[in-house]
Amino acid sequence: MTNNTDATICEVYRVIFRCATWKTKSERYYTAASAAEAFEDLYHSFHRGRVAAAKITVYDVDQYDRYSNLWVSRYHDALQELDTEIIKTLVVKPNKIVMRRG
């Protein structure tokens, strides 16, 4: 067995968003090392055309706590850890982030 001390612990994250003018919210689940990484995965999926909308509004990034069986909001943690190049392309409003393709 090898001793791998560089291994990061991945957690399950849920990103809640609304596509364009839809009435219902959508959820995407990601396994990532941080909330910012989960948000970046959605960001890249959106800009690659994997989300069928010209605009999405992200409402929350939650981390699953497997011990209490609850979802814990990591929205502000994700914003603080995001790359500055990604933040420049977003419209950050109180309690939501708007992404537009283009």
Image (cartoon, rainbow, N blue to C red):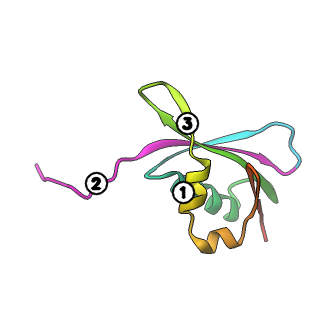
For residue 7, the mark is 2
* Mark toward the viewer: 1 or 3: 3
Nearer to the camera, 100 or 51 = 100
In the rendered structure, the answer to whether residue 98 lies left or right of residue 50 reads right
Q: Which residue is mark 3?
A: 72
Task: Tally the numbered discs.
Answer: 3
Amino acid identity at mark 3: Val
Amino acid identity at mark 2: Ala
Residue at horizontal 53 percent and vertical 43 percent from the top: 13
Instruction: Assign a secondary structure to mark 2.
Output: loop
As for residue 5 lying within the magenta part, the answer is yes
Residue at horizontal 66 percent and vertical 44 percent from the top: 60
| Mark earlier in primary sequence (2, 1) | 2
Confirm or deny contact between disc 1 and disc 3 (CB under 8 A): no
The segment highlighted magenta reads 1-20
Residue 5 image position (x, y, % from top left):
21, 55
Instruction: Assign a secondary structure to mark 1.
Output: helix
Amino acid identity at mark 1: Ala
Q: Residues within 10 Å of mark 2 (few under 14, many from 20)?
A: few
* Mark toward the viewer: 3 or 2: 3
In this view, 33 is above or below 14: below
Residue at horizontal 43 percent and vertical 52 percent from the top: 33
Instruction: Assign a secondary structure to mark 3.
Output: strand
Residue 11 image position (x, y, % from top left):
44, 43
Q: Which residue is mark 1?
A: 36
Q: Residues within 10 Å of mark 1 (few under 14, many from 20)?
A: many
| Mark earlier in primary sequence (3, 2) | 2
Q: CA distance from mark 2 to mark 1?
A: 18 Å
| Mark earlier in primary sequence (1, 3) | 1
Confirm or deny contact between disc 2 and disc 1 (CB under 8 A): no
For residue 54, the mark is none
